Amino acid sequence: MRNGSTLEPAYDQYKASGSVHDFVEQSYEWMLRYTRRKLNKDQEVCHEFLSHFLEKIPKILVRFERESREQFTGYLAWCMRYDFLNFIRQRRKQEPPVCEYPVEWLAQPAESQESTGLEHAIQQLKSLQRIPVKLQWGWNLDIKDFRWLVSNCGAHRTSRLQECFQKKIEKEQIRRQHLQNQMATYFFRMRRGLNGRNYGNLRKRKMEAEHRAPRTVLSLREMGEFLQLSKAALHRHIARARLELRHLLESQALGSTVSRVATYSAGILAQEDRAVLYQFNRVDQRQFLLLEKPKKLEPLEISLYTPQRLCYKLGLSAAIALPLHLWSAGFYELRAGKDLRLRFRIVI
């Protein structure tokens, strides 16, 4: 049976003996091969799914006999495909934060990645002014922002804030893409000469509505729930931030490019009393992954994996910068503790 292509002999033996254990032992390798070939290439995911699926084998055997189907192999394959979809949906709900990080600017000139005057001006603001502005208008948070959030709001609430912020940004991107598709449809119909509706005026009204009521990523109410501030207080902080930004941008000290350090992505991986802050930086032609343990939280054990092997383990007690420009291209997974994972990809 180990080399067989069907499970009919194993099922016939189960009907004769009634032993579910013997059936699982004879059919496990077939189910593992089927999972790897048809459902997922990741061995860890396959084994995790099978450990979940094997608990349902007794019910599947009883249900197959009750429904009086002909081919058990096809029925079991159908059950595996159906259950795998539910398994993946549930797994994604519990999936830790994932960061796809392409290092595609290795061959680009350093000047193209420098910070603009506006980005530099935002960094000069106080935390209570800078963070609400970024959350409202969808600018990326950096590790300095996450330090302040963890110290004032706690690691768990900061993690929930990051998750909500990312979902809102993705939703806004989908909305904007939908609007662009609508505009493309209108122009297509205009070029075809269809009458009965003035698509030019419709487009104009949509664009005017966008300018009259600009959409924010997080509302004052949503920010207040995470930051534990009233809407009035947040409104005052944002108003002060706008005035300060105007003064900074009008000053002669800020040019169009002012910094050779670029920040691409930052975030937090948190679980109860343990957390780690991460940030992807670029300095000239060098790229770094900065890892930092928030103050007053327990130190973490950091493990770096490739799909084939474990690269190294270390204890993270303060901060460390991993030189990404020295690594080979490929997929990597950083594990902090047991359940916190950061996955990224290096493309050279």
Image (cartoon, grey):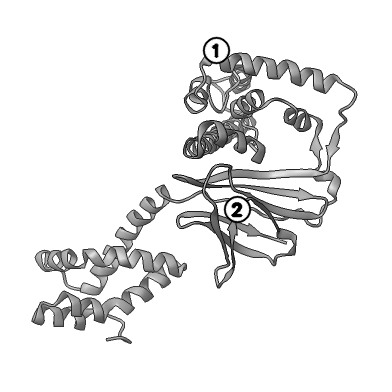
Q: Which numbered tag is attached to residue 317?
A: 2
Residue 202 vs 192, above or below: the answer is: above
Identity, as a three-letter code, of the amino acid under mark 1 = Ala
Residue 60 position, x and y percent, is 18, 65
What residue is rendered at 23% in x and 65% in y? 55
What residue is rendered at 81% in x and 31% in y? 117
Q: Nearer the viewer, mark 1 or mark 2?
A: 2
Quarter of the figure with the C terminus: bottom right
Q: Which numbered tag is attached to residue 232?
A: 1
Q: Residue furthest front?
A: 296
State the separation of the CA atoms marked 1 and 2.
39 Å
Q: Secondary structure at mark 2?
A: loop
What residue is rendered at 86% in x and 45% in y? 111
Q: Secondary structure at mark 1?
A: helix
Identity, as a three-letter code, of the amino acid under mark 2 = Ser
Of the image marks 1 and 2, the number of the one nearer the N terminus: 1
What residue is rendered at 54% in x and 27% in y? 218
Assess disc 2: are there few (<14), some (14-19) or many (≥20) residues with their C-alpha within 10 Å of its C-alpha. Answer: some
